[in-house]
Image (tube, helix red, strand yellow):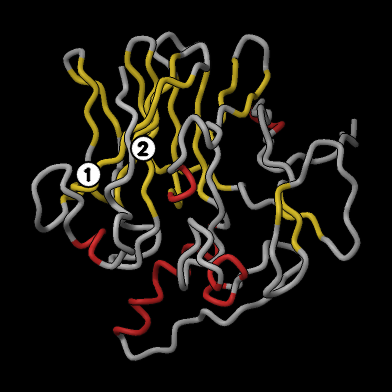
Amino acid sequence: MLDTRPVVPGEDRRNGVTVAAQAQPDRWWFGLGQPTRPIEAGEGAPEGARAQTVQGYVWAFTADEAQRSVWWGTVSNATAGGIATLAGEFAGSGLTPPVQPWDDPDTVSCEFASSYNAVHDIPPAQSVAGDAVPVQVWQYDIASGTATNRTPDEDQCPDLNRVVGLRAAGSIGDVVLLGGIETALTGGAQASGVVMLLAYHVDGTFLGWQRFPEWDNIKNFVVADGRLYFGVGLAETGAPGSGSGPTCAARPAGWCTGSRTPVS
Protein backbone atom coordinates (compact mmCIF):
# COMPACT_ATOMS: atom_id res chain seq x y z
CA MET A 1 0.00 0.00 0.00
CA LEU A 2 1.28 3.45 -0.91
CA ASP A 3 2.25 5.54 2.15
CA THR A 4 0.66 8.95 1.62
CA ARG A 5 1.73 10.49 4.94
CA PRO A 6 3.69 13.75 4.64
CA VAL A 7 7.44 13.26 4.51
CA VAL A 8 9.25 14.52 7.62
CA PRO A 9 12.89 15.59 7.08
CA GLY A 10 15.17 13.03 8.72
CA GLU A 11 12.54 10.29 8.87
CA ASP A 12 13.47 6.81 7.59
CA ARG A 13 10.30 4.75 7.58
CA ARG A 14 11.95 1.76 5.94
CA ASN A 15 14.27 1.34 8.93
CA GLY A 16 11.80 2.50 11.58
CA VAL A 17 13.50 5.85 12.26
CA THR A 18 11.13 8.60 13.36
CA VAL A 19 11.77 12.27 14.13
CA ALA A 20 11.57 13.12 17.82
CA ALA A 21 12.05 16.89 17.49
CA GLN A 22 12.28 19.26 14.54
CA ALA A 23 13.62 22.81 14.37
CA GLN A 24 10.82 25.30 13.80
CA PRO A 25 10.83 28.83 12.36
CA ASP A 26 12.19 31.00 15.15
CA ARG A 27 13.07 34.42 13.73
CA TRP A 28 11.42 37.12 11.62
CA TRP A 29 13.57 38.45 8.78
CA PHE A 30 12.71 41.82 7.21
CA GLY A 31 15.29 42.15 4.44
CA LEU A 32 19.01 42.67 3.93
CA GLY A 33 20.47 45.11 6.45
CA GLN A 34 17.30 45.19 8.57
CA PRO A 35 17.00 44.09 12.21
CA THR A 36 15.56 40.64 12.89
CA ARG A 37 13.70 39.47 15.98
CA PRO A 38 12.52 36.22 17.59
CA ILE A 39 9.10 34.83 16.72
CA GLU A 40 6.73 34.89 19.68
CA ALA A 41 4.45 31.91 20.30
CA GLY A 42 1.26 32.14 18.24
CA GLU A 43 2.37 35.33 16.51
CA GLY A 44 1.28 36.03 12.95
CA ALA A 45 3.74 37.31 10.37
CA PRO A 46 4.36 41.08 10.63
CA GLU A 47 4.09 43.07 7.42
CA GLY A 48 7.12 42.53 5.20
CA ALA A 49 8.52 39.72 7.37
CA ARG A 50 9.52 36.19 6.44
CA ALA A 51 9.93 33.40 8.97
CA GLN A 52 13.35 31.76 9.10
CA THR A 53 14.63 28.69 10.93
CA VAL A 54 17.90 29.99 12.30
CA GLN A 55 18.42 27.42 15.12
CA GLY A 56 18.51 24.47 12.74
CA TYR A 57 21.97 23.06 13.51
CA VAL A 58 22.70 20.82 16.50
CA TRP A 59 26.34 21.38 17.54
CA ALA A 60 26.37 19.81 21.02
CA PHE A 61 24.56 16.60 21.97
CA THR A 62 24.49 14.25 24.95
CA ALA A 63 22.22 12.01 27.01
CA ASP A 64 22.02 11.99 30.79
CA GLU A 65 23.70 9.10 32.55
CA ALA A 66 20.40 7.31 33.27
CA GLN A 67 19.29 7.67 29.62
CA ARG A 68 16.12 9.51 30.63
CA SER A 69 16.61 12.52 28.38
CA VAL A 70 18.83 13.88 25.64
CA TRP A 71 20.21 17.41 25.50
CA TRP A 72 21.44 19.54 22.64
CA GLY A 73 22.84 23.00 22.02
CA THR A 74 22.66 24.95 18.80
CA VAL A 75 24.71 27.17 16.56
CA SER A 76 22.71 29.68 14.52
CA ASN A 77 22.77 30.06 10.73
CA ALA A 78 25.40 27.40 10.13
CA THR A 79 25.68 28.23 6.42
CA ALA A 80 26.79 31.83 6.94
CA GLY A 81 28.81 30.94 10.02
CA GLY A 82 30.69 28.21 8.18
CA ILE A 83 31.56 30.53 5.32
CA ALA A 84 32.64 33.23 7.80
CA THR A 85 34.90 30.70 9.52
CA LEU A 86 36.69 29.98 6.24
CA ALA A 87 36.91 33.61 5.09
CA GLY A 88 40.47 33.91 6.36
CA GLU A 89 41.49 30.74 4.51
CA PHE A 90 40.15 32.17 1.25
CA ALA A 91 42.01 35.44 1.78
CA GLY A 92 45.21 33.65 2.77
CA SER A 93 45.08 31.70 -0.49
CA GLY A 94 44.71 34.85 -2.56
CA LEU A 95 41.02 34.24 -3.22
CA THR A 96 38.14 36.62 -2.61
CA PRO A 97 36.12 35.41 0.43
CA PRO A 98 32.51 34.64 -0.64
CA VAL A 99 30.98 36.93 1.97
CA GLN A 100 28.78 39.13 -0.19
CA PRO A 101 25.25 39.20 1.27
CA TRP A 102 22.51 37.21 -0.38
CA ASP A 103 18.89 36.26 0.23
CA ASP A 104 17.61 32.77 -0.51
CA PRO A 105 13.96 32.23 0.47
CA ASP A 106 14.51 28.45 0.57
CA THR A 107 17.20 28.66 3.26
CA VAL A 108 18.39 31.40 5.62
CA SER A 109 19.78 34.68 4.31
CA CYS A 110 23.50 35.35 4.75
CA GLU A 111 24.46 38.97 5.36
CA PHE A 112 27.91 38.68 6.95
CA ALA A 113 29.48 42.02 7.95
CA SER A 114 26.60 44.01 6.45
CA SER A 115 23.99 42.56 8.82
CA TYR A 116 22.18 44.92 11.15
CA ASN A 117 23.63 43.18 14.20
CA ALA A 118 27.21 43.37 12.91
CA VAL A 119 26.91 47.04 11.95
CA HIS A 120 25.43 47.91 15.36
CA ASP A 121 27.74 45.63 17.42
CA ILE A 122 24.93 43.42 18.77
CA PRO A 123 26.54 40.21 20.07
CA PRO A 124 27.20 37.49 19.24
CA ALA A 125 27.41 39.02 15.76
CA GLN A 126 30.83 40.43 14.96
CA SER A 127 32.22 41.63 11.63
CA VAL A 128 32.06 38.85 9.02
CA ALA A 129 30.28 36.61 11.55
CA GLY A 130 27.36 39.02 11.42
CA ASP A 131 24.62 36.41 11.05
CA ALA A 132 25.10 34.91 14.51
CA VAL A 133 22.25 35.21 17.01
CA PRO A 134 22.06 33.83 20.59
CA VAL A 135 22.16 30.06 20.95
CA GLN A 136 19.58 27.73 22.48
CA VAL A 137 19.63 24.71 24.84
CA TRP A 138 17.02 21.96 24.53
CA GLN A 139 16.10 18.87 26.58
CA TYR A 140 14.08 15.97 25.15
CA ASP A 141 12.33 13.70 27.65
CA ILE A 142 12.35 10.18 26.25
CA ALA A 143 9.42 8.85 28.28
CA SER A 144 7.00 11.66 27.43
CA GLY A 145 8.36 12.43 23.96
CA THR A 146 8.46 16.18 24.63
CA ALA A 147 11.18 18.72 23.92
CA THR A 148 11.64 21.71 26.26
CA ASN A 149 13.65 24.85 25.64
CA ARG A 150 16.11 25.13 28.58
CA THR A 151 17.98 28.23 27.38
CA PRO A 152 18.85 30.38 30.41
CA ASP A 153 17.44 33.89 30.39
CA GLU A 154 19.48 37.07 30.72
CA ASP A 155 19.15 37.12 34.51
CA GLN A 156 20.43 33.55 34.77
CA CYS A 157 23.31 33.98 32.32
CA PRO A 158 23.87 37.60 31.27
CA ASP A 159 26.87 36.71 29.09
CA LEU A 160 25.16 34.01 27.01
CA ASN A 161 24.63 36.46 24.16
CA ARG A 162 28.40 36.40 23.59
CA VAL A 163 28.31 32.69 22.68
CA VAL A 164 28.31 32.00 18.95
CA GLY A 165 27.64 28.27 19.36
CA LEU A 166 27.36 25.41 21.85
CA ARG A 167 29.68 22.82 20.36
CA ALA A 168 30.18 20.13 23.03
CA ALA A 169 28.12 18.44 25.76
CA GLY A 170 28.50 15.70 28.33
CA SER A 171 26.96 14.34 31.51
CA ILE A 172 27.89 12.54 34.68
CA GLY A 173 25.63 11.60 37.58
CA ASP A 174 22.78 14.09 37.72
CA VAL A 175 24.68 16.94 36.00
CA VAL A 176 24.68 17.89 32.32
CA LEU A 177 27.32 20.28 30.95
CA LEU A 178 27.27 22.14 27.64
CA GLY A 179 30.32 23.99 26.38
CA GLY A 180 30.21 26.92 23.98
CA ILE A 181 32.57 29.39 22.39
CA GLU A 182 32.25 33.14 22.05
CA THR A 183 32.61 34.85 18.69
CA ALA A 184 36.26 35.27 17.74
CA LEU A 185 37.63 36.22 14.34
CA THR A 186 41.12 34.90 15.06
CA GLY A 187 41.17 31.21 14.17
CA GLY A 188 37.75 31.34 12.51
CA ALA A 189 34.34 32.58 13.61
CA GLN A 190 33.22 29.09 14.61
CA ALA A 191 36.59 27.53 15.38
CA SER A 192 37.95 29.38 18.41
CA GLY A 193 36.72 31.80 21.06
CA VAL A 194 36.56 32.01 24.85
CA VAL A 195 34.93 28.93 26.39
CA MET A 196 31.74 29.11 28.44
CA LEU A 197 30.30 26.14 30.32
CA LEU A 198 26.61 25.83 31.22
CA ALA A 199 25.52 23.37 33.93
CA TYR A 200 22.10 21.76 34.43
CA HIS A 201 20.54 19.22 36.74
CA VAL A 202 18.98 16.35 34.80
CA ASP A 203 15.53 17.56 35.92
CA GLY A 204 16.09 20.66 33.75
CA THR A 205 17.13 23.10 36.49
CA PHE A 206 19.82 25.54 35.38
CA LEU A 207 22.70 25.39 37.88
CA GLY A 208 25.02 28.12 36.65
CA TRP A 209 27.69 29.16 34.20
CA GLN A 210 31.41 29.91 34.01
CA ARG A 211 33.65 31.64 31.46
CA PHE A 212 37.21 30.43 30.88
CA PRO A 213 39.21 33.07 28.97
CA GLU A 214 42.35 30.92 29.18
CA TRP A 215 40.66 28.27 26.96
CA ASP A 216 39.25 28.26 23.45
CA ASN A 217 37.84 25.84 20.89
CA ILE A 218 36.15 23.34 23.23
CA LYS A 219 35.46 20.00 21.57
CA ASN A 220 34.07 16.75 22.99
CA PHE A 221 33.29 15.32 26.44
CA VAL A 222 34.05 11.77 27.56
CA VAL A 223 33.57 9.85 30.82
CA ALA A 224 36.49 7.70 31.96
CA ASP A 225 37.01 6.04 35.35
CA GLY A 226 34.06 7.89 36.83
CA ARG A 227 35.24 11.35 35.77
CA LEU A 228 34.04 13.67 33.03
CA TYR A 229 36.74 15.07 30.71
CA PHE A 230 36.61 17.54 27.83
CA GLY A 231 39.11 18.90 25.35
CA VAL A 232 39.94 22.57 24.74
CA GLY A 233 42.53 24.71 22.99
CA LEU A 234 44.78 26.89 25.12
CA ALA A 235 45.32 30.63 24.82
CA GLU A 236 48.91 31.47 23.95
CA THR A 237 49.68 33.67 26.93
CA GLY A 238 48.34 34.65 30.32
CA ALA A 239 47.64 32.99 33.62
CA PRO A 240 44.40 31.00 34.02
CA GLY A 241 41.44 33.34 34.41
CA SER A 242 43.42 36.44 33.45
CA GLY A 243 41.54 37.01 30.23
CA SER A 244 44.70 37.40 28.19
CA GLY A 245 45.56 35.50 25.06
CA PRO A 246 44.72 35.68 21.36
CA THR A 247 41.00 35.16 21.80
CA CYS A 248 40.75 38.26 24.01
CA ALA A 249 43.38 40.55 22.50
CA ALA A 250 41.09 41.91 19.81
CA ARG A 251 38.11 42.46 22.12
CA PRO A 252 36.95 45.75 23.68
CA ALA A 253 38.36 46.58 27.11
CA GLY A 254 36.75 44.44 29.83
CA TRP A 255 35.21 41.97 27.35
CA CYS A 256 37.04 38.95 28.76
CA THR A 257 36.78 39.82 32.44
CA GLY A 258 33.02 39.70 32.93
CA SER A 259 31.14 38.43 35.96
CA ARG A 260 30.97 34.71 36.70
CA THR A 261 28.58 32.39 38.49
CA PRO A 262 30.39 29.39 40.01
CA VAL A 263 28.77 26.02 39.39
CA SER A 264 28.06 24.20 42.64
Q: Is residue 159 above or below residue 68?
A: below
Neighbour tally class for label 1: few under 14, some 14-19, many 20 plus, Cα within 10 Å: some
Q: Is residue 95 above or below residue 25?
A: below
Q: Quadrant of the C terminus?
A: top left
Among the 4 quarters of the image, the one containing residue 47: bottom right
Q: At 83% across and 61% down in the image, what residue appears?
A: 49
Neighbour tally class for label 2: few under 14, some 14-19, many 20 plus, Cα within 10 Å: many
Q: Amino acid at mark 1?
A: Val
Q: How many marks?
A: 2
Q: Mark 1 and mark 2 in contact (Cβ < 8 Å)? A: yes
Q: Amino acid at mark 2?
A: Gly
Q: Which residue is mark 2?
A: 179
Q: At 47% across and 73% down in the image, what residue appears?
A: 128
Point out which mark residue 26 bears. none
Taking the image as shown, residue 126 lies to the left or right of residue 14, namely left
Q: For numbered disc 1, what is the local secondary structure?
A: loop
Q: Quadrant of the N terminus?
A: top right
**Residue 107 or 9: which is nearer the viewer?**
107
Distance from Cα at disc 2 to Cα at disc 1 = 10 Å
**Residue 75 or 94: which is nearer the viewer?**
75
Q: Is residue 249 above or below residue 145?
A: below
Q: At 30% across and 40% down in the image, what residue appears?
A: 211
**Residue 29 or 222: which is nearer the viewer?**
29
Q: At 71% across and 43% down in the image, what residue appears?
A: 9
Taking the image as shown, residue 83 lies to the left or right of residue 38, namely left
Please state the horizontal and vertical placement of residue 123, each as a whole percent of the image: 49, 57
Q: Which residue is mark 1?
A: 232
Q: For numbered disc 2, what is the local secondary structure?
A: strand
Please state the horizontal and vertical placement of residue 80, each as a whole percent of the image: 54, 66
Taking the image as shown, residue 11 lies to the left or right of residue 253, namely right
Please state the horizontal and vertical placement of residue 69, each as a whole percent of the image: 52, 16
